[in-house]
Image (cartoon, grey):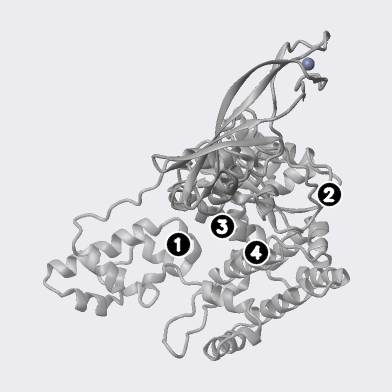
Amino acid sequence: MKRNSLTLPFPDIRFASVALVDGVWDVRAQKLSTAASCPRCQVVSSARHSSYQRRFWDLPIQGRPVRITLTVRRWQCRNVACRQSIFTERLPGIVDPRARHTWRSAGILRLLGHGVGGRPGERLAGRLGFAGSRATILRHLVRHQQLPDHSAPRVVGLDEWASKRGLHYGTIAVDLEHRTVIDILPDRTAVSTAAWLAERPSIELIAPDRDGLYAEASRRGAPCAKQIADRFHLVQNLRAAIERQLRGLERPIRGYRANPERLLDCDGPPSAAGAGVQDEPKELTHMSERSFLLAAFAKVRAMYDAGKTVAAITRELRLSRKIADKWVRLEFLPERTRMAPKSTTPARFAVYLRQRWAEGHRNVRRLLKEVRVKGYTGCYPRLAAFVAKWRQKAAIKQTPATAVTLPLDPRTGAVISPIVAAALCIKPRGMLTKRQAGKVDILKRELPIFACMRSLAMRFRGLLRGHDPAALDTWIRDAMRCRIPVIQQFAAKLRHDIDAVRNAILEPWSNGQTEGQVNRLKMLKRAMYGRASIALLCARMRPLREVEYHQI
Ligand SMILES: [Zn+2]
């Protein structure tokens, strides 16, 4: 190669020689300068001390790595007040002190690491002629992304993500305006999230997850910022409320609803559990399910031992084939496996809580204080959710609707399940298939309560997009008057968080994109085999703040 055909676009650098050694372009060059400024005191010095050689990698040429050996000078600092007596010349815009890659080369490596990760980045870099292992690529990426970020987010979405599902969760913060991830926190606590929010005074609007923890963190860390309830989750909460109401209409155990008497009444007098079928269906489902199952299991076993086929048993008892198949192969009906509850779960204190509840102590704050003394380390919302089941059960029992069952689907002949009915209840007619519309018509005709809830649900969906907060007040008033306990509870919750719900109606923001970013995080986490550190996950999730590689 001719000497003059290779030019280095770096100022004050004289090209000396180039040679291909072991597949690498070995470029020799020299820094030409008559003076340099001291990195400590910035005073310019022209007193030369000595010189030394620096080696670093640059952009490849013809698919082969380029290693530059640059002779750089050392200088003496003449400033008597400066502690630095000798300094080496800095190469701003070319290479950082002690770095092994030029800025432009490191920029490309970061881009590869950000786009495809360590190992694929290493393969791609090698093919393109860059010298850089996956560790180098990821180190460049993480260090660069950890540089101070001066962006000032205004609208922020908060959500949780599972670093170990069921065991450990972190927090993700998204700039909803710029559709970018701002940060990934390693934990999910109100304290750390509040501290994070407090460091960012530019935040005006916060869209927290429906988990009360982030709402609490927002109140603590950014008291001036407005909270926005998520519209999707509001509708989902309404759906869950409707489902709870419809479950109250359900018969005790789904597998046996066709003929529970036949399962239990064949041998002599009905058992205690059998008697409970008619009297207290809800209690049976939750409390006596085990005894009911044991009786049913004994019946199936006896029939099988008497020589009946599984098909005959299934037909006669109207059991599911799957259950009958499983039971005939079992000697005993195994206990359900349940994990011992931790101190953060209210279930650990269930016996005590149940006793206090039975005594009439129903104030959750007070119960929280009491179980805290007993070692409960969980939060208020979890305890509230735990005892809410008992409150709802009592409420459902009070409604006259418990005597009614959900209607049959004419196509299948099976009872429409509460899950399906609740999902249909909140789905607008335009989005229903013909079959679904048929089901909705049957439900509306046979269950006045369903018709009432559907009408309220449709109005609720409409008002979420109507930008009219006055309609919300009317809706809440109507919902409180509807005499359906779960809808009244839902309306009461809305009233409790009325500002956030109003903002959901007025503001265009929702937490949808935060959910999307959580999906992206899961994808990246799995692409790195779940072994990436929080710093690396954060570096890949945040947009790459790059400028210099455009200037190559
Ligand atoms: Zn100095």
Under circle 3, the secondary element is helix
The residue that disc 1 covers is: 285
Can you tell which mark lies on residue 112? none
Q: Residue at x 69, y 68 (%)?
A: 487
| Separation of marks 3 and 1 at Cα, in angstroms | 39 Å
User: Looking at the image, do the residues carrying marks 2 and 4 touch, with CB atoms under 8 Å apart?
Assistant: no
| Separation of marks 4 and 3 at Cα, in angstroms | 25 Å
| Separation of marks 2 and 4 at Cα, in angstroms | 24 Å
The residue that disc 2 covers is: 225
Under circle 4, the secondary element is helix
Q: Earlier in the sequence, mark 2 or mark 3?
A: 2
In which quarter of the view is residue 150 placed? top right
Vertical arrangement, residue 455 with respect to residue 167, above or below: below
Vertical arrangement, residue 543 with respect to residue 269, above or below: above
Nearer the observer: mark 2 or 4; the answer is 2
| Separation of marks 2 and 1 at Cα, in angstroms | 45 Å
Nearer the observer: mark 2 or 1; the answer is 2
Residue 152 position, x and y percent, is 80, 47
Residue most extreme to the left: 307
Nearer the observer: mark 3 or 1; the answer is 3
Q: Earlier in the sequence, mark 3 or mark 1?
A: 1
Q: Point out the quarter of the image occupied by ligand 1.
A: top right
> In this view of the protein, which residue sits in the foreground, 309 or 465?
465
Q: Earlier in the sequence, mark 4 or mark 3?
A: 4
* Other-residue count near label 3 (Cα within 10 Å), few / some / many at <14 / 14–19 / ≥20: few
The residue that disc 4 covers is: 237
